[in-house]
Amino acid sequence: MAALDTREMESLQLGIIGMGDMGKLYARTLYNAGWKNVNVCDMPSKYEQLKKEFENTGIKVYSDGHLVSRKCDWILYSVPAEFIDQVVATYGPSTKVGAIVAGQTSVKAPEIAAFEKHLPDDVHIITCHSMHGPAVNPRGQPLVVINHRGTEDKLALVVRILSCFESEMAFLSYKEHDRITADTQAVTHMAFLSMATTWKHQQSFPWFDPTYTGGIENVKVNMAMRILSNKWHVYAGLAILNPSAKAQVRQYSLSVAALFKLMIQEKEAEFVSRIRAAGEFVFGSRTDRQQRDASREPILLDDTLLDQYSLGSVPKDKRKPNSHLSLLAMVDCWYQLRMNPYSHMVCQTPLFRFWLGISEYLFRNEEFLNDAIQAALYDKEIREDDMEFMMSARGWQECIELGSMDGYRIRFEETAVFFQDRFSEAAVIGKRMIDMITTKTAQP
């Protein structure tokens, strides 16, 4: 972390409006790093509870955002994207002259629109997005900084403020951010949720099923459980409010359906040709992969390492073939959209890193890939699951395209209820997995 001016850290007033989990992470990290004037608030109804939680910490708690806005030199709105317009409309006009305003929403188009509409012209808009959840160590993780309306000296100040997170800063426009996060978050979450919904419809717990045994399957299961154990509105906002997400979500659903239709007709030549073309586009030809593998470490470690993160007790030697339709369709989706997922690592999340990692692992291992292709085309035992997966993906896609927050909530909560008894155990294993891959990400 760069050396900071002690006088600046003692005099500058920092403010956070919205004290959910990420707001609390920011407040504590900033104060513990030496920024002595951290001022926070949440809804007025939470004032007494928040004041009690932060008593004796040095962090100053206020009853509403007007008091934070008029006082602070840097103000972060840490509220869900669906509420950003309402909250900025309420507190934005009170913003101190010359202050810097940022947001921590995962979708920047509505955030920027709210800032432009409700903030005074004499304030700077330099927003940000930490690409991880509140339980993840921010060190080495991507932190996007967006200078939408700010001077160079104000941008430099923002960099100094955020440097205490020890994250890898990336400087993008808000449109670039939303286009990339549509892939790294919205479509990735949809794929995991589609698998979970499939298991719910099948009344099947995957950790007891030999089809879902092995390292790749452990990633699918544990990351799906991690999503479902969190708050639905985080994922709904990412998908529904991101203007770039709908096209990508639609293509993923189309890729699932197109591959499934070839599978049930057993059109092997066409199926294999499509899979190989997609694989070469994303991962390079076999020669390209061999040359690249010699020059860089793969995203994930081997299947043996991932085997240890299992919720079940099915022996590995009892494993049954799996078509990996969810992964084949994602690589096909990237191919159809002519998107290079490696270029999106600037906005990677741990979940996206896992998703790209297991896709990469499948396509780098010829034996695994051939087994998946043969299972997809000829193994009738898993055809039922693949059909349900196609239907689940279509259901999530239609819900997102319709922009139905309530529909998203119902689908999410009904799926979560089916698995909720295993959330505590899955949380422990999922954290170990996240720690493993984030530690690897942070290594120089």
Image (cartoon, rainbow, N blue to C red):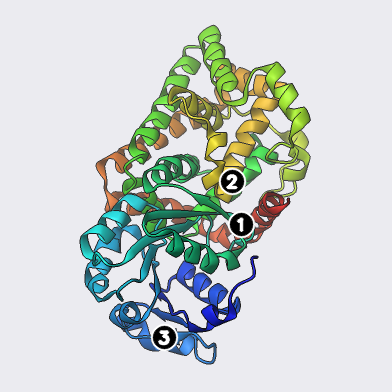
Q: Which label lies toward us, 3 or 2?
A: 3
Q: Residue furthest top?
A: 269
Q: Marks 2 and 1, Cα distance to the nearest angstrom?
A: 9 Å
Q: Residues within 10 Å of mark 3 (few under 14, many from 20)?
A: many
Residue 426, numbered label: 1
Lower position in the chain sequence, tag 3 or tag 1: 3
Image marks 3 and 2: residues in contact by CB distance under 8 Å: no
Residue 190 placement, left or right of 137 = left
Name the residue that disc number 3 marks: 61
For mark 1, give the secondary structure. Answer: helix
Q: Marks 3 and 1, Cα distance to the nearest angstrom?
A: 34 Å
Q: Marks 3 and 2, Cα distance to the nearest angstrom?
A: 40 Å
Q: Residues within 10 Å of mark 1 (few under 14, many from 20)?
A: many
> Which one is in front, 316 or 398?
398
Residue 88, x across and y down, in percent: 27, 67
For mark 2, give the secondary structure. Answer: helix
> Which one is in front, 332 or 404?
332
Residue 248 placement, left or right of 281 = left
Toward which corner of the image does residue 71 lie, by quadrant?
bottom left
> Which one is in front, 362 or 87?
87
Residue 221, numbered label: 2
Residue 17 in sight here = yes
Residue 220, x across and y down, in percent: 58, 43
Residue 389, x across and y down, in percent: 46, 34
Lower position in the chain sequence, tag 3 or tag 2: 3
Residue 377, numbered label: none
Amino acid marked by disc 2: Val
